Image: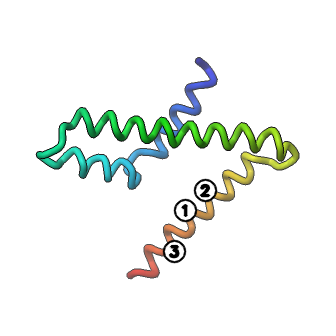
Amino acid sequence: MQQMIPVFLTVFLAELGDKTQLATLLFASDKDRDPWMVFLASAGALVVAAAIGVLCGAAAAKYIDGLPMKLIAGVGFIAVGLWTVWSHFAQA
């Protein structure tokens, strides 16, 4: 359980307000869609996406053990953040 808390919090905070949540909100706002079906479909999609991430991460840990995966992930997040900020100001 202690291992789950930082994973849950990190993923939960990363998902708040992202494009996936906004898309789910838009689907749920459609009067022709059952909100429970939207919830089940979006939850299923997130579970499958997370499973792919876990499988890729586990495989990467086996085959590229010498690489600092946390550093690579951190640099990746920073790069995406900088790209997002740059694209915001490039459109202005």
Q: Quadrant of the C terminus?
A: bottom left
Q: Quadrant of the N terminus?
A: top right
Q: Residues within 10 Å of mark 2 (few under 14, many from 20)?
A: few
Three-letter amino acid code at the position of disc 1: Gly
Dot placed on the residue nearer the N-terminal end, 3 or 2: 2
Three-letter amino acid code at the position of disc 3: Trp
Q: Nearer the viewer, residue 79 or 54?
A: 54
Residue at screen point 30% across, 36% down: 39
The dot on residue 51 is none
Disc 2 target residue:
77
Residue at screen point 67% across, 43% down: 56
Three-letter amino acid code at the position of disc 2: Phe
Render colour scheme: rainbow
Q: Nearer the viewer, residue 39 or 84?
A: 39
Dot 1 lies on which element? helix
Q: Quadrant of residue 60?
A: top right
Q: Residues within 10 Å of mark 3 (few under 14, many from 20)?
A: few
Q: Are marks 3 and 1 in contact (CB under 8 Å)?
A: no
Disc 1 target residue:
81
The answer for how far apart the CA atoms under marks 1 and 2 are is: 6 Å
In the visual, does 89 lie left or right of 7? left
Disc 3 target residue:
86
Q: Quadrant of residue 6?
A: top right
Please tell me whether residue 59 is drawn above or below residue 5 in the rendered image.
below
Q: Nearer the viewer, residue 25 or 88?
A: 25
Dot placed on the residue nearer the N-terminal end, 3 or 1: 1
